[in-house]
Each structure stands twice: as structure tokens, then as C-alpha cells.
Image (spheres, rainbow, N blue to C red):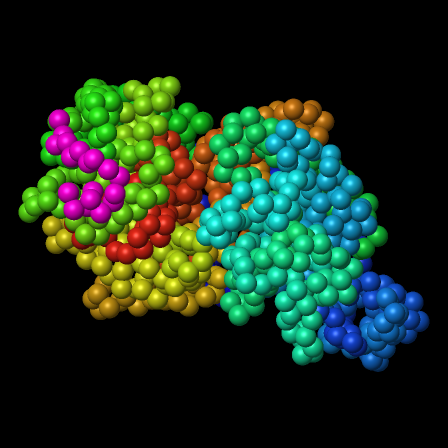
């Protein structure tokens, strides 16, 4: 439960807001709710079954309660909804309710006992209680009345009648389109969020996919299937991720039920779901519940539908275009889908004490984009947030001591490398990056141990500025991770990799320019600079933190920590933190922020410490707010105090959430429901901080202007704040920082320090899972 008193309040807005922004009209996918009877209560009843029913047999529970409905109504429970192991009802019956039902030659006893009563007055922004849940139940009941079924645990509903409507026969796919809903409570007002949902399904079950791999090698099968998702259309209609494949088990093997009885998988599926398994020799898929590591489910491949796209399909442009027709909707198309669902839901919800309104209007602001400073020019971006590098970069570089490492199988390979070096030199020269001829390290094979031994011999006691490797795509998995570890951890040398597909690109000059830019960045030379907003101290340190979880099992998680060491945000301190698998919060953040502050002190001539520290934290959800405050934020506060008893900088922590279903559309002219085809994505710099935000301090920003599909904004929630910043200064600082990621000429979805932290966490977590050399800690080596 979130402690309301611990969340900072929203600061006031200053007169400066009108100078740095313009007002814009938007609509959202949030529909205001009203209740017909304000005093209606929600009564909670605990339900037990005799004999017991398995936790995952939701359909069986629903069927037994349905058969017992008349018996329960006679005893006073006139209307009700089954919710997990509870019954929800507006009727209050204090006596214990006992009903009977017969199903498939078994007699069941349903026992319901009243537990608690809630009213609409119990609604809250920061706690989830039975009132909130009962509203979600009412919505789900309405969707079921509309003939839709719930898939997974994220309130996504699909119409089974439409499962074959959106077929892509040439690729063996179908796109199941549906709706996702969520009850929200903003500033004392209830809303229903409605969004379009889709799920790509294959025409294969997991067993058929296994056979299609045409291999009997167990490890090859695991490499292809572990990490993929499957749909179990029986039971709870759940989506499972394949964590492992157990070839020692089959449907003929037995396991223990909750009552201690032994049963085979074949018998279990026949008794519970009336499903006859055909192939009794198939192995079982393994699913490990993230929330409970001890809970393991064994699944029968034959009964599971493959979901998503294969790697080959993702690389097939025609396939992706066919899928996008059904999944990547324009703003107008998406709002049409949302509004259509709203109209259908409105009729059903009115029967359940809920009235929906179609007032989707939201006021927003569009911030002015920052000016971009290059070597001898400055640029102002347009509403797209993009710009191009055609002139000398902000800080030029001279790359004069570098290795070009490649496998030479003859003159053709040598000529290819000469072409690459020549193109790098030519394109780099145009933008102020001077690249001398490299020292060529030619290998006769692709054995990674031979590569590392040769590099060690060539380096000796004089490491070069940079090592550039040129490798074939098929060798990337075998070589890339080892080279990164060698350069990053063992030698402390910046590394740039070039794949052989460079030679096949349609515009090699453009690609060469990008590679030259990356080489320069990795040596600590920024391509451009952005101004700090007025009101931000010259002694500000901005920090980005993100988490990367390896999809495969038995791999540790990695946190990326990146801090800017001056207000211009041109020099960084980078530190990876290795954590146990699946861990979301770190107990080392306090120690690392002290290291960052020390690096800041050294970088600024040991003259001063930062007087303002702003931390952007990505990779955690709303359910972890209290845990985040008690662990990482408290650690950072304690660590800052430990530096000096008189040291008390301004300090703010902002949590980032990108995985949201909030949608905003720009109203170009007129009323969006009267004049269709008037909706577009919000422009770069759009801020939403009214009506559908909390009573505390949060805001949405769309930093990028999206031209394909529908824009997903980024949500920022301030968890700690003792600064004197106005509200719009937080918005402006956040937005400006989205332009400082030097691997993209434009805005990214999150502040650049967070993007760098993500890249660092991904790079280390996906390859060698270790520390980086101290020589590289201040370079932007995580690109």
C-alpha cells in the first residue's frame, strides 16, 4: 500500500510557462465515470469449494458457481460476480451461504461467507481496494456479455468470433484484435481507460513448431524456443513464456495434486478440461512464475498456440507490412476503435450502476524545443524534433591511433576493409572528425581465442585509442561478446564494431558518417550540445538509472547507472551493477552515487560538489513505488548526507514508466467527433499535466513526433523533491534531456542519461556481465 503522505505535492507554475510553451487541445482515451447510486455498497464474500478446485481452473469455478446461482439467490444473494476466490455483490447477507451443484457426475458444495462491506467513498488514487476491483469486475462482466474473452492477466479482451477475421495466410499468421481497459482515479475523479489491443498468433501449436525446426538436437530446439510466448486456450486462457524444455518428461509422467493424489498429465487434462492429448511422447515446456520462483508449471506443447513472429518473419519486410495493417493504427483509426468500444461498453455498464461520458478533451502544452549547438552553427528543430549533422560537430576529434581488426581470407577482404576505412575518413572529414589510417590486424580465422591472443601481442604496453572490428553477421554471436569484455573490462579500450552488411547498404556514405560519429563519441567528443533551461544551476548533476533482465534463464540482471558531470551534460560517469536474476531494486545505489559525486568533484577541478542532483529512474512499476522509496531513494539520501554533514544539495527522484496504455491525440480543428480525419499524433514537446494526472506530482511528455502508428507518451512520477523548481522547469529539463542522446539526431523517448543507462545495462547484461575498466567510466562507451 502506497503511503500518500510520502509523495511530494505538485509545485506551482510560474509566469515563464507562457514564454516557453503554447497551449494545445488534445483528446485522450480516458472516459469520465459516474455512478447512478452513490451509496451503493460492495460486499465481499470468501468462497470455498468441496471438493477443492484447482487454482488455475477458472472456467470450472465459474461453471460451478453458475450452476449454484439459483440456490444462492434463494438465500438472499440476488446478484453477484465471482472474482477469483471471492464473490462480489451489492447485497449484504451476514449468514453463511451453502449451495450445491452437480457437474460431470460430481457433487460440489459452494460455501460463501461475508467478509467486508465497502462503499464508493473508499475510492483512492494510491490504494487498490475492493471498490476499485469491483468496478474492474463490472467492466469485465460487460465485456463478457459482449461475447469477449480475457486473454492473460492484463485485462485484454478479444472476441473469439473474430479470431479468424484478420488472417495473413501467406505467412501463416492471424491478428486477433481486441480491447484493454483499466479503471483510473485522477484528482478525485474516476475514469475508464480504453485502448485498442492486438495479439499476433501463428497457425502452429508449440509441438508443430518444434517439428518444423527439423532437428533432433535438444540444445538447438531450446535455443529456438526458450523465451518465446504461447497461448493456452484452456483454463484461464493464459499467455505463458517458455523458460525451459524438459525432455525427460512427457504427458505419461505423474505429478501430485494439492490433495496429495498422483495423476498423469494425460489424465489431468482429460479430467479437468476434457482434452485428449494425442502425442504421449512429446516433452513438456516449463514456465517459472516471476512472482513466485517456487511455482513451476509444466505445459503440453500440443495444447499451446505459438504467438508472435519468428526472427525470419521480423526480417521479412512484406510480412511486417502485412501485420502492421492490423496492429499499427493511425491516431484516427485508433480513436475510432476506442470510441467504438466505448459506445458498446456504455450500454452494458449502465445496467451496473456506471455511466460513461465521452468527454475525452484534455488541455496540454507544447514546449519549445532546445536549440542545438554544433561546431560553428546552431539549429532550432521543428515539431518533429529531428535535425541533421551536415556541418562540423560541436567538439571535433583526431583519431590517430586505432586498430582495424578483421578476418582476411584473401584480397577481397582486404579491399573491403580499405573501402570502409576510406569512406570513414572521407565522411568524418566533412564534419570535423579526422581519422588517420589505422593499424591493420589481420586474422586468418574466426577463432575468438586467436583474436584475443593476437590483440594482446599487438597492444603490448601501449593501448590504442580505439579498436574497430569488422565481422560477418554470422560470426557476431561468437565474437562480439568476447571482444566487448576484452576491450571494456580487461583493457579499458573503446570499441566500435562494423558488420559486413555495411558493404551492402544502399547509402554507405550515410552509414560511414554515422560510424565515424560513434567512434568520436566513444572517445568522449560530443557531436552537439544543448543549453540548460533557465533556472537550472550550473552545478547540477543529472543521473539516469535503468535495469536490463536477460530473457534466458540463469543469467543475472544488470543495472546501468550514468551521471553527467557538469551542467552541459557532455561528460559522464558510468557504472554497471550486477544483480541477481529478476532483481528490480539495488542495494548498491548509495555507494555508486557517492562514486558519481566524487567523479563530479574531480571533473570540476576539486572546486565544488553538485548543489542539485536530479535522478531519473526507469525499470520499475507503480506497484514498487514504496519499495523504491525505502531502498534506493533512502540509500541515496543517506549516502549524500555521509559525504559532509553540511552538504545538503537540492534532490529530486523521478520515476519513468514507458509501458503504459495512455494515449493522446492532437485535435487539429473542430470537434473530433463531428469532423472525422482530424486527429494526429501530438507534436514533439507535448506535455499533459492536468485532468488525467494524479493529485500529487506527475506528468506525461511526448518527446518524439511519431509518423507511423500511434504515439505512446512517457509517464513521469516525482517520488522525491526538495528543489525550488517550478512545475514547468521539471517538464523543460526532462524534455531538453531527451535531445542529448548522441546516437540519435533528434529526441528519444526518455532523458538521454536514462537511454545511456539502458544501453550500458543491456550491453553488459547481454554479454559478459562484469564491470567496465576505470579508464572507460567517464566515456560514453555504452553506445
Asked if one can make out residue 42 in the rendered structure from this viewpoint, the answer is no
Instruction: Where is residue 661? Give x, y as percent.
Output: 58, 45
Is 625 situated left or right of 28 in this image?
Answer: left
Q: Nearer the viewer, residue 251 or 64?
A: 251
Q: Residue at x 44, y 36 (%)?
A: 703
Q: Measuring 85% from the left and 77% from the top, which residue is drawn there?
A: 98
Q: Quadrant of residue 436?
A: top left
With 61 as the anchor, is 442 left or right in this view? left
- Looking at the rendered image, the quarter that the N terminus falls into is bottom right
Front residue of 307 and 697: 307
What residue lies at 58% left-to-right and 45% top-to-bottom? 211
Residue segment shown in magenta: 437-454
Near-viewer residue (19 or 780): 780
Residue 318 within the magenta-colored segment of the rendering? no
Q: Position of residue 229 (x, y in %)?
A: 57, 49
The residue at the far left in this view is 461
Tally of marks: 0
Amino acid at each position: 500500500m502506497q503511503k500518500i503522505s510520502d509523495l511530494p505535492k505538485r509545485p506551482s507554475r510560474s509566469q515563464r510557462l507562457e514564454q516557453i510553451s503554447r497551449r494545445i487541445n488534445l483528446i485522450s482515451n480516458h472516459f469520465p465515470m459516474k455512478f447512478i447510486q452513490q451509496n451503493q455498497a460492495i460486499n465481499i464474500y470468501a468462497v470455498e469449494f468441496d471438493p477443492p478446485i484447482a487454482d488455475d481452473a477458472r472456467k470450472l469455478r465459474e461453471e460451478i458457481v453458475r450452476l449454484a446461482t439459483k440456490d444462492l439467490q434463494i438465500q438472499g444473494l440476488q446478484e453477484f460476480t465471482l472474482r477469483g476466490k471471492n464473490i462480489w455483490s451489492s447485497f449484504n447477507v451476514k449468514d453463511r451461504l451453502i449451495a450445491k451443484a452437480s457437474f460431470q457426475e460430481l457433487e460440489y458444495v459452494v460455501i460463501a461467507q461475508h467478509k467486508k462491506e465497502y462503499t464508493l467513498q473508499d475510492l483512492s488514487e494510491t490504494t487498490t481496494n475492493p471498490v476499485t476491483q469491483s468496478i474492474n469486475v463490472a467492466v469485465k462482466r460487460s465485456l463478457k456479455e459482449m461475447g469477449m474473452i480475457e486473454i492473460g492477466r492484463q485485462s485484454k479482451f478479444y472476441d473469439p468470433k473474430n479470431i479468424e477475421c484478420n488472417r495473413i495466410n501467406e505467412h501463416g499468421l492471424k491478428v486477433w484484435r481486441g480491447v484493454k481497459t483499466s479503471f483510473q482515479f485522477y484528482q478525485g475523479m474516476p475514469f475508464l481507460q480504453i485502448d485498442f489491443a492486438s495479439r499476433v498468433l501463428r497457425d502452429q501449436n508449440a509441438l508443430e513448431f518444434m517439428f518444423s525446426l527439423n532437428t533432433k538436437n535438444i540444445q538447438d530446439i531450446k535455443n529456438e524456443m526458450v523465451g518465446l510466448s504461447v497461448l493456452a486456450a484452456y483454463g484461464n486462457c493464459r499467455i505463458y513464456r517458455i523458460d525451459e524444455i524438459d525432455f525427460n518428461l512427457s504427458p505419461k509422467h505423474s505429478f501430485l495434486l494439492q490433495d496429495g493424489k498422483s495423476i498423469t498429465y494425460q489424465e489431468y487434462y482429460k479430467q479437468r478440461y476434457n482434452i485428449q492429448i494425442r502425442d504421449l511422447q512429446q516433452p513438456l515446456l516449463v514456465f517459472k512464475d516471476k512472482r513466485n520462483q517456487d511455482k513451476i508449471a509444466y505445459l503440453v506443447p500440443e495444447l499451446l498456440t505459438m504467438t508472435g513472429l519468428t526472427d525470419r518473419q521480423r526480417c521479412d519486410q512484406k510480412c511486417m507490412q502485412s501485420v502492421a495493417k492490423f496492429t499499427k493504427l493511425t491516431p484516427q483509426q485508433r480513436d475510432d476503435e476506442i470510441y467504438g468500444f466505448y459506445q458498446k461498453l456504455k450500454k452494458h455498464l449502465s445496467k451496473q450502476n456506471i455511466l460513461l461520458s465521452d468527454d475525452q478533451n484534455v488541455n496540454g502544452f507544447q514546449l519549445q524545443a532546445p536549440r542545438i549547438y554544433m561546431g560553428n552553427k546552431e539549429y532550432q528543430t521543428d515539431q518533429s524534433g529531428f535535425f541533421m549533422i551536415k556541418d562540423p560537430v560541436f567538439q571535433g576529434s583526431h583519431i590517430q591511433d586505432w586498430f582495424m581488426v578483421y578476418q582476411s581470407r584473401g584480397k577481397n577482404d582486404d579491399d573491403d576493409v580499405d573501402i570502409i576505412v576510406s569512406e570513414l575518413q572521407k565522411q568524418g572529414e566533412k564534419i570535423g572528425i579526422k581519422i588517420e589510417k589505422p593499424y591493420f590486424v589481420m586474422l586468418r580465422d574466426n577463432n575468438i581465442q586467436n583474436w584475443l591472443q593476437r590483440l594482446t601481442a599487438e597492444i603490448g604496453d601501449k593501448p590504442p585509442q580505439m579498436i574497430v572490428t569488422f565481422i560477418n553477421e554470422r560470426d557476431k554471436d561468437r565474437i562480439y561478446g568476447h571482444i566487448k569484455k576484452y576491450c571494456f573490462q580487461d583493457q579499458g579500450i573503446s570499441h566500435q564494431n562494423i558488420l559486413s552488411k555495411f558493404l551492402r547498404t544502399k547509402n554507405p556514405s550515410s552509414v560511414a558518417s554515422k560510424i565515424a560519429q560513434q567512434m568520436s563519441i566513444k572517445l568522449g567528443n560530443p557531436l552537439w550540445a544543448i543549453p540548460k533551461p533557465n533556472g537550472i544551476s550550473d552545478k547540477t548533476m543529472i543521473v539516469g538509472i535503468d535495469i536490463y533482465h536477460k530473457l534466458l534463464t540463469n543469467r543475472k540482471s544488470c543495472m546501468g547507472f550514468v551521471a553527467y558531470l557538469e551542467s552541459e551534460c557532455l561528460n559522464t560517469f558510468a557504472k554497471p551493477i550486477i544483480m541477481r536474476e529478476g532483481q528490480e531494486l539495488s542495494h548498491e545505489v548509495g555507494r555508486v552515487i557517492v562514486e558519481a559525486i566524487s567523479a563530479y568533484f574531480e571533473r570540476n577541478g576539486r572546486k565544488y560538489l553538485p548543489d542539485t542532483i536530479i535522478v531519473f529512474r526507469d525499470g520499475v512499476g507503480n506497484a514498487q513505488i514504496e519499495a523504491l522509496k525505502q531502498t534506493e531513494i533512502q540509500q541515496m539520501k543517506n549516502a549524500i548526507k555521509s559525504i559532509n554533514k553540511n552538504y545538503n544539495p537540492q534532490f529530486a527522484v523521478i520515476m519513468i514508466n514507458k509501458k503504459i496504455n495512455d494515449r493522446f491525440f492532437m485535435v487539429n480543428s473542430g470537434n473530433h467527433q463531428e469532423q472525422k480525419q482530424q486527429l494526429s499524433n501530438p507534436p514533439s514537446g507535448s506535455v499533459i499535466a492536468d485532468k488525467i494526472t494524479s493529485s500529487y506530482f506527475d506528468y506525461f511528455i511526448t518527446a518524439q513526433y511519431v509518423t507511423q502508428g500511434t504515439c505512446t507518451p512517457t509517464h513521469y512520477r516525482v517520488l522525491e523533491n526538495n528543489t525550488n523548481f517550478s512545475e514547468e522547469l521539471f517538464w523543460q529539463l526532462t524534455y531538453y534531456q531527451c535531445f542529448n542522446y548522441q546516437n540519435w539526431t533528434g529526441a528519444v523517448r526518455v532523458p538521454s542519461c536514462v537511454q545511456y543507462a539502458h544501453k550500458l545495462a543491456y550491453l553488459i547484461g547481454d554479454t559478459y556481465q562484469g564491470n567496465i575498466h576505470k579508464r572507460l567510466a567517464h566515456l560514453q562507451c555504452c553506445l
